[in-house]
C-alpha cells in the first residue's frame, strides 16, 4: 500500500469513529455560534470533506473534533463572505474568528445538544418535521434514510427539512432550553418525538435501513445524560426499554403478531427488562409522577413475574386516566378491567367509546376479543372484520384474520 | 424581533356585553396592555369593529370592485391585533397566551417582515 493510500484510509477510519455522537455535538456547537441550521450543516459537511484530504496527507490531528470545529467555523465564514458584501456582517465575522481560537481543547467544545433537541421539537414546527429534524441533526441520519423510514420521496423529505429550518430562522424559534414554567409541556413534545421515532421502528422492524427503535433509545439515553434525574425522561427511557425487550417475541416464525399473554417469555430480553424496571423505579421514587412513568410502570407489570399483574395495572390506568383523559387510555383501562374480572364494566366502557374510536383498529380488536368471551360470535365476527380493515401492518392483519377464522364459518 | 398577534374569535362564542364574563375579559385585556407596556414590548395594537362593518376591494382588469363583507367568510374573524417586539418566538407566545380571547378564539403569531436585516 502506498503512503498516500494508507493515510487516506486512516483519515476515513478516524472520521468514521467520530460517528454520530460527535456529529451531533459538533453540529449543536456550530448552531449555537452561527444561529443558522443550514449554514452549520453545510459548514460541517465542508469540514468533513477537508478532513479526508488533510488528515490523509498530514495524519490525523491530536484533537479531531477540535480540528473539525475550527475548520467548520472557517468554512462557515467563507460561505457568509460569499453571500454578502455587507461590512457590518464582515465585522461580525472578525469576532467569530477570534472566538474560534479558544476551541483547541476538545473538552472545551460545548455540548449544546439539549438546546438542539428542544429547538427541533418546538411545537411551532409540524410534528412530522420535528421527527425528521431530530433524526437529521441529532441522529445524523441522511435525508434519504429518513425518507425511507417514512415512505416519502427523498425530494419531499428534503423540502420538509428545508421548510422546518427556514421556519426556525424566520419565526425566531429560540435555540434554548425552555424556562422552568414551560419545561413540562416542552419536554412532553421532545419525548413524544422520541416515542414516535421508536414506534416507527417498532412497527416497521429493523429491516428498514437504520433501526429507528434503537435510534429512539439512543436519543432518550442521551437526553437522560444531558438532563439527569428528570423522572419523565427516565419514564420514557424505561417504557422504550421494556417495550423493546419483548420485540423478538411479538411475532411468530410466519411474521404473525403474537399477543402479549401468548408470547414466549423466554424470548424476552431479560437484561433490558431489568434495566427498564430499575429505571422506572428510580423515576417513581422522585415522587413526581407523569404519563411516561405510569406507562412504563404498566409495561413493568406486564414484564415481571409469570403473568401480568392485572389489579395493579387497573390501578395504574386510573392514575394515567387522571393525567391523560383520552379515549385511548380509557380503552386500555377497559381491557385491563376485563382481564381483572370486570367484564361487564369493561363492555359498558367500550360502548361509550364507540364514536370516539370508530376508526381505531385496537378498539375493534379489543371489542371482538371481549365479545368472544361473552359468546357473542356474530358480534365478534363483525368487530374482527372491522379491525382487519383498519390494521396498520400485515402482521396485525394476519393475527386478526386467524382469530376471525377460529370462530368458524 | 417584531411579531403581530392576530386575535381571531367567533362572536357567537365571545362573552356578551354586560355579563360578568365580559367584564373579566376586558379586565384581562387591561392587565395585558399594562403588562406589555411596563415590559416595554408593546409597539401597537387596536381592536376592530365587527365584520358586518367590513368592506372589501380588489382591482380586476383595471376596474375597482367594491364588496360588502370581509375577505373570507369564516366563523372566526379577525377582531384585533397587537404588535410587540421581543427576543424570540417563545417570548411572543408567552404574551399570546395572556390574550383573553385565546380562551375562546385563536391567536395567530406572525413575525413581521424585516426590510433591513443588516440594520
Image (tube, rainbow, N blue to C red):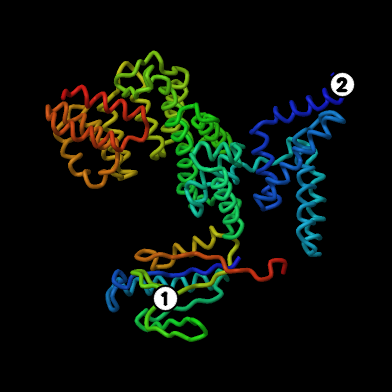
Between B3 and A227, the one nearer to me in the picture: B3
Provide the chain ID for the residue under circle 2. A
What residue is rendered at 61% in x and 57% in y? A169
Q: Is residue B38 visible?
A: no
Residue reaching furthest front?
Answer: B61
* Residue designated by label 2: A2
User: Dot 2: what SS?
Assistant: loop
Task: Please indicate whether residue A25 sits to the left or right of residue B64 in the image.
Answer: right
What residue is rendered at 47% in x and 78% in y? B46
Image coords of residue A107 (percent x, y): 73, 35
* Residue designated by label 1: B71
| Quadrant of the image occupied by residue A389 | top left
Task: Please indicate whether residue A79 sits to the left or right of residue A190 in the image.
Answer: right
Between A129 and A316, the one nearer to me in the picture: A129
Image coords of residue A261 (percent x, y): 29, 21
Placement of the N terminus of chain A among the 4 image quadrants: top right
What residue is rendered at 87% in x and 21% in y? A2
Residue reaching furthest top?
Answer: A266
Amino acid at each position: 500500500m502506498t503512503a498516500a493510500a494508507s493515510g487516506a484510509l486512516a483519515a476515513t477510519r478516524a472520521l468514521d469513529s467520530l460517528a454520530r455522537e460527535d456529529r451531533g455535538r459538533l453540529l449543536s456547537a456550530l448552531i449555537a455560534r452561527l444561529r443558522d441550521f443550514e449554514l452549520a450543516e453545510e459548514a460541517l459537511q465542508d469540514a468533513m470533506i477537508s478532513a479526508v484530504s488533510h488528515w490523509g496527507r498530514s495524519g490525523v490531528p491530536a484533537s479531531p473534533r477540535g480540528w473539525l470545529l475550527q475548520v467548520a467555523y472557517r468554512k462557515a465564514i467563507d460561505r457568509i463572505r460569499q453571500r454578502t458584501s455587507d461590512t457590518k456582517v464582515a465585522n461580525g465575522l472578525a469576532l467569530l474568528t477570534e472566538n474560534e481560537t479558544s476551541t483547541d481543547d476538545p473538552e472545551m467544545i460545548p455540548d449544546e445538544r439539549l438546546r438542539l433537541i428542544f429547538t427541533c421539537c418546538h411545537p411551532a414546527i409540524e410534528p412530522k418535521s420535528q421527527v425528521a429534524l431530530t433524526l437529521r441533526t441529532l441522529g445524523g441520519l441522511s435525508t434519504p434514510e429518513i425518507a425511507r423510514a417514512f415512505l416519502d420521496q427523498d425530494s419531499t423529505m428534503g423540502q420538509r427539512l428545508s421548510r422546518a429550518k427556514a421556519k426556525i430562522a424566520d419565526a425566531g424559534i429560540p435555540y434554548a432550553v425552555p424556562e422552568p414554567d414551560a419545561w413540562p409541556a416542552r419536554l412532553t413534545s421532545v419525548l413524544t418525538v422520541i416515542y414516535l421515532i421508536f414506534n416507527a421502528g417498532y412497527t416497521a422492524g429493523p429491516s428498514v435501513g437504520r433501526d429507528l427503535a434503537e435510534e429512539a433509545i439512543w436519543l432518550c439515553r442521551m437526553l437522560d445524560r444531558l438532563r439527569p434525574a428528570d423522572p419523565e425522561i427516565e419514564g420514557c427511557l424505561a417504557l422504550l426499554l421494556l417495550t423493546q425487550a419483548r420485540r423478538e417475541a411479538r411475532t411468530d416464525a410466519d411474521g404473525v403478531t403474537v399477543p402479549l399473554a401468548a408470547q414466549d417469555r423466554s424470548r424476552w430480553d431479560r437484561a433490558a427488562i431489568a434495566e427498564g424496571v430499575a429505571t422506572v423505579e428510580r423515576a417513581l421514587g422522585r415522587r413526581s409522577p407523569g404519563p411516561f412513568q405510569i406507562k412504563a410502570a404498566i409495561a413493568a407489570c406486564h414484564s415481571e413475574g409469570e403473568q401480568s399483574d392485572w389489579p395493579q395495572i387497573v390501578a395504574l390506568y386510573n392514575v394515567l386516566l387522571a393525567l391523560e383523559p383520552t379515549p385511548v387510555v380509557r380503552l386500555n383501562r377497559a381491557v385491563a378491567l376485563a382481564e381483572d374480572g370486570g367484564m361487564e364494566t369493561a363492555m359498558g366502557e367500550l360502548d361509550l367509546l364507540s364514536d370516539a374510536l370508530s376508526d381505531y383498529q385496537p378498539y375493534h380488536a379489543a371489542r371482538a376479543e371481549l365479545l368472544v368471551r361473552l359468546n357473542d360470535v356474530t358480534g365478534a365476527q363483525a368487530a374482527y372484520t372491522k379491525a382487519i380493515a383498519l390494521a396498520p401492518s400485515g402482521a396485525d392483519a394476519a393475527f386478526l384474520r386467524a382469530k376471525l377464522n377460529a370462530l368458524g364459518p | 424581533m417584531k411579531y403581530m398577534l392576530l386575535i381571531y374569535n367567533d362572536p357567537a362564542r365571545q362573552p356578551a356585553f354586560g355579563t360578568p364574563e365580559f367584564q373579566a375579559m376586558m379586565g384581562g385585556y387591561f392587565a395585558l396592555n399594562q403588562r406589555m407596556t411596563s415590559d416595554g414590548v408593546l409597539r401597537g395594537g387596536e381592536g376592530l369593529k365587527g365584520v358586518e362593518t367590513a368592506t372589501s376591494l380588489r382591482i380586476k382588469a383595471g376596474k375597482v370592485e367594491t364588496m360588502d363583507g370581509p375577505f373570507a367568510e369564516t366563523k372566526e374573524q379577525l377582531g384585533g391585533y397587537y404588535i410587540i417586539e421581543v427576543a424570540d418566538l417563545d417570548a411572543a407566545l408567552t404574551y399570546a397566551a395572556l390574550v383573553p380571547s385565546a380562551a375562546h378564539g385563536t391567536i395567530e403569531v406572525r413575525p413581521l417582515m424585516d426590510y433591513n436585516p443588516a440594520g
